[in-house]
Image (spheres, rainbow, N blue to C red):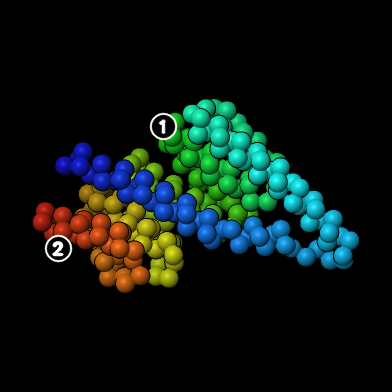
């Protein structure tokens, strides 16, 4: 049973990473465009600023792509050094993106503690766009399901579990799975039932929630 549960956790974690990175980019792209298009005031100042911003963003973009290439070539240490340098002196959206990618590299290396710390740092960065902060907290929470407590998971994502939040279903699933793994089947059932009752829940998450509800019901471990 434990091996089956661990396999299920890994499967939904991998699916979440893919789905949420696509979601975050859709939400964050307008922010990047808005920053580049910011009006500074005065025709000359505006044009000068836009030239500077485009030039520096282009350089940061090139550095980001180079770091991604290193990661894809299975050179994690070189990739981490490149991402960390970009996080310190990059422009535009790239410092935050670099921190997120660095956290992913840590995770790929098997250093979940470093990955959680890096994701949590972005999640707590008041200067980062909300979409990026929520994504980072979600990634930290899903890693904490394996290594942390229910309270640690809740500290990352419970605020996102409210109706109307685009990540509510994923937050509830993380909370439900964490409670289930901790042996609190009553709490797990409550979270999964919220997923099942919400018409806005994506079908894949709703299906997984129903599987877990059926599992809890058949076990007789929750009223």
Tell me the quarter of the picture where residue 185 sits: bottom left
Crowd class of label 2 (few under 14; some 14 to 19; many from 20; radius 10 Å) = few
Q: Is residue 86 positioned above or below 33 on the image? A: above
On screen, residue 175 above or below 63: below
Question: Which badge, 2 or 1, is on the more N-terminal residue?
Answer: 1
SS for callout 1: loop
Task: Give the residue pinned by disc 1.
Answer: 110
Q: Nearer the viewer, residue 113 or 134?
A: 134
| Badge 2 element | loop
How many tags in the picture? 2
Front-most of residues 131 and 52: 52
Residue at the spot 29% in from the left edge and 67% down from the top edge:
194
Q: Is residue 43 visible?
A: yes
Question: 10 Å neighbourhood of mark 1: few (<14), some, or many (≥20)?
Answer: few
x then y, percent, for residue 52: 80, 51
On the picture, is 90 further left or further right than 43?
left
Q: Which mark is residue 223?
A: 2
Q: Quadrant of residue 82?
A: top right
Quadrant (top left, top right, bottom left, bottom right) of the C terminus: bottom left
Spatial distance from mark 2 to mark 1, Cα to Cα? 38 Å
């Amino acid at each position: 049973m434990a091996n089956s549960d661990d396999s299920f956790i890994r499967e939904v974690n991998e699916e979440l990473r893919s789905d949420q990175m696509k979601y975050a980019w859709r939400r964050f792209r307008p922010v990047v465009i808005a920053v580049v298009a910011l009006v500074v005031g005065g025709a000359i100042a505006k044009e000068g600023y836009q030239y500077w911003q485009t030039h520096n963003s282009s350089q940061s973009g090139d550095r980001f792509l180079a770091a991604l290439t290193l990661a894809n070539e299975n050179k994690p240490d070189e990739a981490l050094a490149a991402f960390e340098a970009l996080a310190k002196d990059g422009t535009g959206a790239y410092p935050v993106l670099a921190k997120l990618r660095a956290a992913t590299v840590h995770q790929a290396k098997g250093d979940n503690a470093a990955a959680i710390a890096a994701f949590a740092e972005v999640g707590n960065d008041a200067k980062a766009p909300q979409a990026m902060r929520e994504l980072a907290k979600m990634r930290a929470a899903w890693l904490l399901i394996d290594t942390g407590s229910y309270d640690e998971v809740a500290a990352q994502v419970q605020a996102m579990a409210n109706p109307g939040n685009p990540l509510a279903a994923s937050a509830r699933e993380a909370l439900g799975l964490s409670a289930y793994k901790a042996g609190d089947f009553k709490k797990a059932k409550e979270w999964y039932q919220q997923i099942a009752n919400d018409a806005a829940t994506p079908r894949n998450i709703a299906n997984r929630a129903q599987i877990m509800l059926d599992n809890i019901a058949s076990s007789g471990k929750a009223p």
